[in-house]
Image (cartoon, helix red, strand yellow):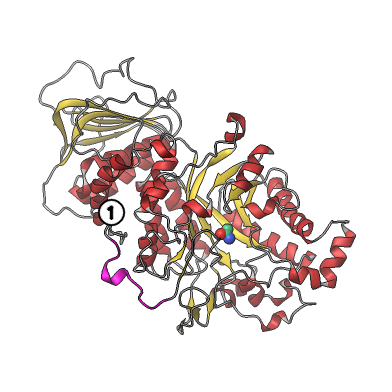
Amino acid sequence: MPDTDGPTRHPDTPAARPAPGTPPAPDPGTPPLPGAGLIPAPLSIDAAPGGAVRLGPDTALAAAPGTEDTAHWLRATLGDAYGLPLPPGSADATDTLALALDAALPAEGYRLEADARWGVRITGGGPAGVFWGAQTLRQLLGPHAFRRAPLTPGRPAVLPQLTVEDGPRFGWRGMLLDVARHFLPKDGVLRYLDLLAAHKLNVLHLHLTDDQGWRLEIRRYPKLAGTGSWRARTKLGHRASPLWDERPHGGHYTQDDIREIVAYAARRHITVVPEIDVPGHSQAAIAAYPELGNTDVIDTTSLQVWDTWGVNPNVLAPTDTALRFYEHVLEEVLELFPSRFVHIGGDECPKDQWRASATAQARIAELSLAGEDELQSWFIRHFDRWLADRGRRLIGWDEILEGGLAEGAAVSSWRGYAGGVAAAKSGHDVVMCPEQQVYLDHRQDPSPEEPVPIGYVRTLEDVYRFEPVPPELTAEQAAHVLGTQANAWTEVMDSQQRLDYQVFPRLSAFAEVAWSRLPAPADRDYQDFTRRMAAHYGRLDALGVDYRPPGGPRPWQKRPGVLGRPIDGAPPNV
Ligand code: ACM
């Protein structure tokens, strides 16, 4: 609320202030800023001593053209949390929340100025920058801003007087959600989009198909989301566990659900990258359409949607039938998902059936290929060209490097850094998501109390010290690292609560790695991060996130007696 009129609206940024993209000079003399505790950390915070900035019932919202999505989002979130109407107003008036664009800033960069006299101004390089600035505003207001109704009617929204300059390190800041192993109903996906937005993450990689379920309605092939979307029972725990959940499990997204998810994401400046996994991880599709499998090797009509975990031998046949089928599937995928990148999997495709199949061997001979690895490359290259012809780009797991990388393809480097390094060195784009660092299904503490503990111990601090760009890359090669993503595979995460437990708080640390310009891993100030996390847990509480508390699982978060597979050193291969 302004107490005097001033001659100028939000003075120009002083020349001394670093431009977005420039790491701030450390200022050890600056006292902790009340209300800050931002995650991910911004490039710079410039505190203006004294005043507090209040947004109240009279505060207006002035949205310049191009900022309407953020205006809508602010009215919905702060409107609900504080009962603020935020009526339209003029950017030149006092007591205003003003949203503006300035092409001189990077597209996702922003400047947030909070001034006790004038209100708040968020200036973004593009609409996404304004939206990320609005996320910062919400964090500055405190945990109450994350609730959906006012606890105290009339309570104002208050933030400190300050200027924040900010912008992301990477353009691809993602999370993979495996909705195939355990289906996450649509509301859960929308909720995760909100959680990603709150952390300035901008890619949701949706793993829609696998041996254990097909989750996407395809009009031309209704049995995919029919037969292919449910399994009779489910292995409880690691595949070596003797336990079963005898309840059928299933579910799928209708095409309208997907349109809603994609549009909801777009309003939050998040791209949904669909994954249709081929030629491995395809038993659910083969169970629905047995002609897709290696019918000269096994009786594919006997296959059902898989009820346990691991790498599955029942892969697609390298036939024209399979190629045409998946072209038809992808035609519908392209209609639904505007994402430039389309993920076609390509991981963990055992070649035993191809070795035993006269049809596969005839194809190898016809194409003069060196063997089954090249047959896989041929399969992937087919879709690389097919997608490129339609103005899209293929991305696949790093196995697509074996037998030669398809032209224009990008790689999700999951088996460590090596695939990503090889791809970047040969001029291919890379998303770094090494399982040794950022697989969120892996346990987050060595204690046997961790629910269904699998894989490596990867603590909050380990994730905070993850570095997406390996040092052996030159600057030119490193430019091929589009960014990074954390992957939440759900074999042992059978509910939203279990998912929350594995994902949080580690996704908060990951978001800072993906957004902020952190020093080298050993030099990162983890103590400072944990101090800011103290504020952030309050936000996660208000959002209803069932995170792992720093002291370990709450009683209901444990899964006593369900076998996991804790290992050190070797790949977990759940
Ligand atoms: C993967 O984890 N199989 C990509």
> Is 297 contained in the magenta span?
no
The picture quadrant where one finds residue 63 is top left
Q: Quadrant of the N terminus?
A: top left
- Relative side of 120 to 412, left or right: left
Residue at screen point 54% across, 46% down: 432
- Relative side of 311 to 572, left or right: right
Residue at screen point 31% across, 19% down: 13
Residue at screen point 34% across, 68% down: 449
Q: Nearer the viewer, residue 335 or 252?
A: 252
Q: Nearer the viewer, residue 112 or 492?
A: 492
Q: Secondary structure at mark 1?
A: helix
Residue at screen point 46% across, 74% down: 237
Magenta region: 552-562
Q: Nearer the viewer, residue 557 or 171?
A: 557
Count neighbours of disc 1 (C-alpha within 10 A) and say few if under 14, some if 14 to 19, many if 20 or more.
Answer: many
The residue that disc 1 covers is 540
Image location of residue 137, percent across then percent down: 27, 39
The picture quadrant where one finds residue 551 is bottom left
Above or below residue 376? Residue 421 is above
